[in-house]
Image: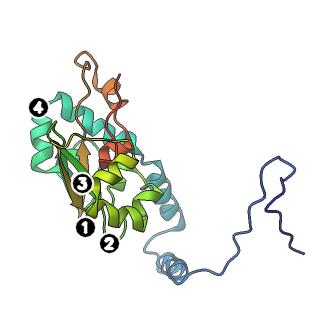
Amino acid sequence: MPHDHADHLSPSGHPYRPDDDHPLSYWQTLEIAVRELLVEKEITTAADIAEQIDAMDARNPTMGAQVVARYWTEPEFATALLADGAKATREMGFDIGPMKLIALPNRPDLHNIVVCTLCSCYPRNLLGLPPDWYKSRAYRSRTVREPRKVLAEFGVTLPESTEVRVHDSTADMRYIVIPNRPARTEGLDQAALAALVTRDSMIGTGIARTP
């Protein structure tokens, strides 16, 4: 018999969580049906699907941070990244897939911020899964209308002289923001520089850490 444990702790000392036993959504049912059909038709295997899921789960912002650090330190790579972001990152071993990737360098007088107003298009192959707030209706709508207020809520307050430019991702185009390189980092190698690059700084809702 079910009990409401919302205000009680489990034997482990953690709050009880409600069972996730609601009916499958239409999209969940469709995904299961397509997956089982692909396996049944021997187009793929369950092991191949699991391997791809593991590969996607392993992607994280450190990959994008390596791209930024290389941009900061290698002028030739910076030129290549601006010319064709997908090709330049693919040559680093980060395949963005069939989508176009555009690098957006910040400047002292320009700050870029990325949003997807329709859904949650995001450079997952470089940054991993998007944060929940990126997918929220509030972020998707307010960033376009009042980007400075949104940035301030993330702790980024910019001078009025700095232009804030909003970029809307699409189904076939992704963006990565290149944050300004922090001061006093001239002697750092790429690994140390990459450690200063945060996920939010590559979305535009943050800045790179100072050493």
Q: Which dot marks residue 170? A: 1
- Quadrant where the N terminus sits is bottom right
Residue marked by disc 2: 118
Q: Is residue 56 visible?
A: yes
Residue 171 placed where, x, y %? Answer: 27, 69
Residue marked by disc 3: 175
Q: Tell me the crowding category of disc 2: few under 14, some 14 to 19, or many 20 or more residues within 10 angstroms, Cα based.
A: some
Earlier-in-chain disc, 4 versus 1: 4
Mark in front: 2 vs 1: 2
Question: Residue at 19% of width from left, 41% of height from top?
Answer: 106
Residue type, numbered disc 1: Thr
Q: Which dot marks residue 106? A: none
Mark in front: 3 vs 2: 2
Q: Is residue 121 visible?
A: no
Earlier-in-chain disc, 3 versus 2: 2
- Outermost residue toward the top? 187
- Quadrant where the C terminus sits is top left
Earlier-in-chain disc, 2 versus 1: 2
Residue 30 placed where, x, y %? Answer: 50, 82
Residue marked by disc 4: 75
Residue type, numbered disc 2: Leu
